[in-house]
Amino acid sequence: MSHPWVQGPRKDILDTYGFDVLKNGMLMEFYSTILNLVATISELYIPPAPGRQQEKFGSFQFQCIGVMADPKVKRVANAHIKEGSMQELDMAEVEEARSLGRQILYVSMGTVATCDHFWNSPFGAFGVDNGLEHCTGKQLTQHVFRSCFEALGGDTGVLVIVSLGPQEDALDGLPAAPRNFLLRKAVPQLEALLRCSAFVTHCGANSMHEALSLGVPMVVVPIFADQPLNGDSVAASGAGLCFRNPLDTLSVTSLRSALQQIMDPSETNSFRASAKKMSEKLTATGGVQSAAESVLAQARTGKATAGGA
């Protein structure tokens, strides 16, 4: 919290409003003593680890309200890439592939593994619990890309969309991408998921919920933080398979086997059925409408406060 970009705004707020926003901890530790909304469902909910706010003020009420994503809104994977610096994904090409009976697979490892901070630096303590402490973002991302190239290259029945991320050397040292792959620095994720048969993902909270809300089963290659637990939840729900310790468990053979199961076009595909059930549960929880109603209900009582404020 000693960084100038933290202390500067902190001082401005204190001078202007007489309120120290970090007096009792970081903002991420501030919970409402009345109600806290969580954009998930009970089956996927992971309670927060005990922190200073809970130690000082006790337990807090959390209400799951489902997914707040809107398929009509264009959310781009790696949205920090400057507009105009990338080739956009042609959805007409994707739709043509679907009209010919081809399945669509979407591959994205999110923004953390591909960011400047971790691209050439080991995950260190962040990756210890997943066997990735000595692995860099580039190494893990390329391991996934290479496995996908070799597992699906030449399969004319599948069109693979890959979100590469912002790094210019994302493909250095890898074999040439197979002809059935579309590689882009960034992809409009919700638009891609709407057309997908399956999703290879790091399973960050946004990606997991967006995929499940649309009934898309997943092959999970988690990195750290909430991702391994998210992957466990997806596997437990039956909506996908999770490769914990991916440097040891993810191979061309294991990935091909996982995708064959998850992309099985038959009516007996349990992964697709489970993903659809999770989609129905997420929808039933209410999403934006539920969140708005809960906030308005609390506003009408006039009792809304923030723990630690």
Image (cartoon, helix red, strand yellow):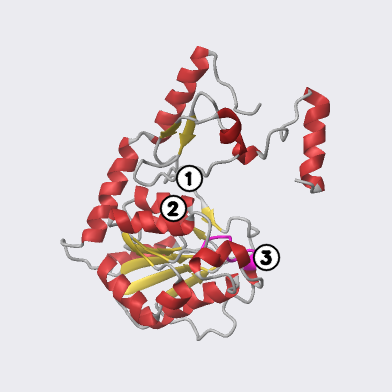
Give the percent coordinates (x, y) of residue 189.
46, 56
Is label 3 in a helix, a strand or a loop?
helix
Three-letter code, disc 3: Asp
Using the image, determine if residue 308 lies above or below residue 276. above
Q: What residue type is labelled 1?
A: Val
**Alpha carbon of mark 3 to alpha carbon of mark 2: how far?**
24 Å
| x and y percentages locating residue 206 in the rendered image | 47, 50
Q: In this view, does 263 lie to the left or right of 291?
A: left
Quadrant in the picture for the N terminus: top right
Give the number of the mark in front: 3 or 2.
3
Secondary structure of the residue carrying tag 1 is loop
Give, as a three-letter code, the residue at label 2.
Leu
Q: How far apart are marks 1 and 2 (CA)?
A: 8 Å
Q: Range of the magenta residues?
A: 109-118
Task: Please give the residue where the numbered disc 3 appears in the rendered image.
Answer: 116
Tag shown at residue 73: 1
**Label 1, label 3: how far apart the Cα atoms are:** 27 Å
Task: Assess disc 2: are there few (<14), some (14-19) or many (≥20) residues with their C-alpha within 10 Å of its C-alpha.
Answer: many
Q: Which residue is most to the top?
A: 301
Choose between 188 and 54: the one closer to the eye.
54
Q: Give the overall secondary structure of the magenta segment.
A: loop
Magenta span includes 110: yes
Q: Do the residues labelled 1 and 2 touch (CB within 8 Å)?
A: yes
Q: Which residue lies under the disc numbered 2?
A: 190
Q: Which residue is drawn at 58% across and 40% down?
A: 51
- Quick one: label 1 or label 3, which is nearer the N terminus? 1
**Nearer to us in this view, 24 or 302:** 24
The answer to which quarter of the image holds residue 255 is: bottom left
Q: Where is residue 216 drawn, in percent x and y?
A: 33, 56
